[in-house]
Image (spheres, rainbow, N blue to C red):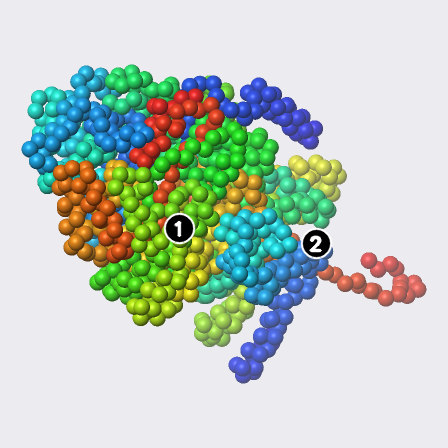
Amino acid sequence: MSGSSTSLKTYALTRLALVVPMVLILLTLVFLLMRVAPGNPIAAALGGHVAPSVIKQITHQLGYDKPLYVQYGNYLWGILHGNLGKTITDRRPVSSIIVENGGATLELTVAAGLVAIVVGVVVGLLAGRFRDSWIDVGGRLFGIVAYAMPVFFLGFLGQLLFGVWLGWLPTSGQASPITQAFLPIHTHILIIDAIWAHNWGALWDVIKHLILPATTLGIVIGGVFIRLVRVNVIRSLKDDYVEAARARGIGERSVVYRHAFRNALVPVVTIVGLQMALLLGGAILTEETFNWPGIGSTLVTYLENRDYAGVQGIVVVFALAVVVASLVIDFVNAFVDPRIRY
Amino acid sequence: MKRRLRFVLAAAGVAVAALWAVTGATARTTSSSSILIDGSTETVTNIDPAGNYDYGTATVDYMIFNRLLASGPGTNLAPHPELATKCSSVGGLATWACDLRKGVEFSNGDPFTSTDVKFSFDRTIKIKDPSGISSLISNLKSVTTSGPYRVVFHLGHPQSTWPNVLTTTSGSMIVDHKVYPADKILPSTSPQVGTGPYILSKYTPGQQAVFTPNPHYWGPKPANGGVIINYYKESSTMKLALEKGEIDMAFDAFAPNDLTSLQKEKSVTVYVGAGAGIRYLVMDVGAQAKKLGVPTDNLAVRQAIAYLMPRQDIATRVYHGQVKPLYSMVAAGLPGHIDAFKTVYGAAPNPAKAKAVLQQAGVSTPIALTIWYTPSHYGPASADEFAEIQRALDASGLFKITLKSAEWSQYVNTLGTTKGVFQLGWFPDYVDPEDYINPFYPKGQFLQNGYDNPKMDALAIKEEGAKTQEDRLAIVEQEQMLAAKDVPIVPYWQNSMVAVAHTDVKGIRSTLDPTYIMRFWLISK
Amino acid sequence: MAVATATPRGIRRRLVGPGLRRLWSPVAETQGLARVMFVTGATITLFFLVLAFFARWIAPYGFTQYQAHGHRFAQLAHPSAHHLMGTTVESDDVLSRVVWGAQTELKVVFLALVLSLLAGVPLGLVSGYFSGWLDRILVLVMDALFAFPPLLLAIVIAFLLGSTVSSGVVTAAIAITATYVPQYFRVVRNHVISVREETYVEAARALGARPFTIISRYVFFNVVQNVPVIATLNAADAILTLAGLGFLGYGVQPTQAAEWGYDVQRALSDATNGIWWTGLFPGLAIVLLVAGLTLLGEGLNETLNPVLRRRRFGRIDFGPIAPGEEERT
């Protein structure tokens, strides 16, 4: 890599072009891994009820005994036509899983992301500004302990405290059963659906269910943000223009808030993007802990049942989400920061 | 900026507090309406009856479809009329004719006739769904109709228990021939049409199924204004939801510790009824055992294990009395059940006899053996259960057990062909001793453990062709004794049908019976 | 740095000494808060290392031991004199499981780190130094792996290996390795690319040194200074990933070894029944060990990262001012 600077357009095109081989590699990887492992989805579904000859016959019927490259070719062909296939165990089209459960995961990750940003930015700013004071020490310690907490442990404590002992918040699900039964669902992001239907009781119910899971995941991820924001604040406080502003006689508070902070927050976009993978991974554990009907817990179920189609579809979507997010982040960064070259 | 921030925060706090007060804290949200909310940890696959063979989906199907004949509730276990008013054999046990109920309508107004019955059976066989449901009616050669209210079943070989098969969910769950495709499954998210007491008005896969009463239903009105089944992945989450009043009742299934703790709660009642599910240990024998190199080929080894099985310990320590020790593959409470294993091996573990039988056969101890179980499919207590079995066998000094586990999808794939000694559970298709023997002992059973005894095969044929119930049950007893003597399988517990509900829910006791069907239409609050 | 005039063996000796000293100097130069963090982190980590190494002598019972002196332990017993942290639903002692769990966690993490380093560092060195199509392909593959949420990748691999590899420890280690190789690869490669342009490397190339010599002698030590910080922070992450795997039921099986994540998962249902000790102690152990490793890494980072670094300065004494001289600043 010679490091010559190229125009934004070239950079954008190159990055876009790289998305396709990346996704292909991921697809292939997952496909191979799932096929090569022992275990058979047909047998899992039939569950100790029927003779092996029947299992064999049905495996043949569904085409799972064809040679690997034929299955792979069929799968790619299907994807090109927008057909991600159907799951084997409960015959759900993968695309509808992504829409239905993906909406729930989106709701959770966005809310958690917001909490993480608020926690991370606020504590990080304060810690960087008052470096080495007790605010800094406290903030950094909080960040470290927050991230050291496994999200399921924090969830467990939260459920215990707020759900069982105090009884303030519900401990599972996206909404109470009655709300879920009677709220007309369009986007599967229940907050939006509740607002759409002007059902304020339902909205409050949904928010109550969202508080614990989003805060749990948000605090854990926020712990990481604190460290990154703090480093950025320290760096920008050392910059020449800050020194210059001080020399010009501008008050310390104005210097800090108007100049240093604003510039320190520019990389926040990058930070958020980098943590996408972390957020999605944490979502899996959070969903399992809080019985949240998202893609993460659905994936775990399909993994256990060896549901090739289901796992493939979901894993690819996960990876695609991260790829697209990092692409967007990189574009924004390249646009904003002229120092970045490809 | 700081001042502004402080103001915004304060305003937000006030708003939150106000909203809270207005909408109330988490009081029991369900008490007002007559809709019953139930919790379950089961999973639902295809709601189309031709496409599922699992308990969770069957529960949904029972709400919206009817069968030709029904079993239960209560002690009324013999097949009795539902959509068919009478079913009897015609000239030998290989042909059966059923008269159908007149004036029944589907939930969309379509009339119910013999066409629908023939259609339902035909499509089940044609679709041959991977779930294996069509194997239940493998003995059916063809169905013919004789007028709009009579169907005739032509079987492959005589079967006296054919009416029992008609109480199962295979084929006998009648669907509207105008709505369902003849050669493929109707997706679960498409509207389902049946003759049952409810309509499935909303279905969110993996989360919730909402039922409203069917206005076209031919039978008595349901005791409640509708049912919502909420699906949970974990028993502990469901328990919390029940305690907080988010659900009125929960059925299937609680982990033993959760149930014990619920029994101490005053706001809920734990109902325990007769169950029909069993748990057993399978051992490879004969050529299969030799191929794998497991010592269970030797009868003495199997007998020793039968002598040492710690049934009571498992029932008390692991399941806190929620399961009962089982001494035969046929569930207790069924006609024809005898405690065969108690007769042959005694009720409590007997290390002395185990040692004696091994010494007599000249087997050197301790015997190294690997026992397999699956950690989640049969509930999280499986690990504890097998820890108990391992401890009992090791403590006798006669065995050295290594435990191995595999997730269900891998586990069930190969059963006896790769595992010498392994855990399995069974849940009957219909409540009759035949369904507890035929899947396991005659030739061609799915266990693949190599058991092959011509005497047992002969008994099975005799049993299927027996003319009277008395004859049949006598043969069933013989089969159980033979099973205990040959001991390729050691049964060890039988479950109970357990439901937990808030104190204002009524009617649960009436539906707790060995058929294990939760008849929500009998429950009110 | 001495110029390469002596025999190869002499060079190696002379390079190793200063090289190691260079590795240790950041530690010696820590000061203030960074030093506190470093020391605290090191103490905590050392504590768990001791637990892990001497588990056999520290733990009162075995990790699946359910009885002693002829009588069984009670099930789900409160913490008491006999069982300082209570017992589990299988009548196992919680304290023992926590201690043995330390051994499991550190075993897996150590194995995973070694494997990641063995795989990632050489690949990064080679890829960064030689560039070309090999580099492009490797970068693509590594980026693709990096795009995977790490827990997801670990789950899939642990799940698949679980049936063929009998040791749960090895399975979990390999699963975690797969998530870290791209990181080491990336960091090493980027560093190599920048070091590659340094004048002394160019000089070596001009002198006719072979690529392998250049890499091992000049580039390696320079690059490897980054690794300890990342390694400790990765170790912290790896423990979380391992606990996550255990929580979901993959990786180490309960019959093979005690694992904290698995214990917390079993304890989830205990919590709703008012039993807090089966989950609290393993959970706290995870938090403590991960926090310790992070503090260690952060402390190191404070000193190694030039943005944050503040060296310890000794006092400079200029000596007394002679009469007539002005103030020296």
Tell me, yes or no, whether the two marked residues, 2 and 1, touch with CB atoms within 8 Å: no
**For the residue marked with disc 1, what is the amino acid?**
Arg
Q: Taking B352 as reference, is A52 above or below it?
A: above
From the image, tell me which residue sits under label 2.
C33
Number of other residues with Cα within 10 Å of mark 2, as a class: few under 14, some 14 to 19, many 20 or more = some
Same chain for marks 2 and 1?
Answer: no
Q: Badge 1 sits on which subunit?
A: B
Residue C113 visible at all: no
Label 2 vs label 1, nearer the camera: 1
Q: Looking at the picture, tell me which residue is in the foreground, B256 or A104.
A: B256
Q: Of A202 and A237, which appears nearest the observer?
A: A202
Chain letter of the residue beneath label 2 in the structure image: C
Q: CA distance from mark 2 to mark 1?
A: 61 Å
What count of labels does the image hold?
2
Three-letter amino acid code of the residue under disc 2: Leu
Give the quadrant of residue C233. bottom right
Image spot of residue B45 (x, y percent) = 30, 36
Residue A241, how many percent across, how many down?
66, 44
In the rendered image, the quadrant that contains the C terminus of chain B is top left
Q: Is residue C241 left or right of residue B354?
A: right
> Which residue is outermost to the left?
B91
Look at 46% across and 65% down and name the residue there: C118
Mark 1, other Cα within 10 Å: few <14 / some 14–19 / many ≥20: many
> Residue drawn at (9%, 37%), measured in percent from left and top?
B94
Q: Residue at x 25, y 56 (%)?
A: B486
Please state the horizontal and vertical placement of residue A338, each as a whole percent of the image. 52, 45
In the rendering, at what x and y percent does residue B498 appear? 40, 35
Label 1, on which residue? B311
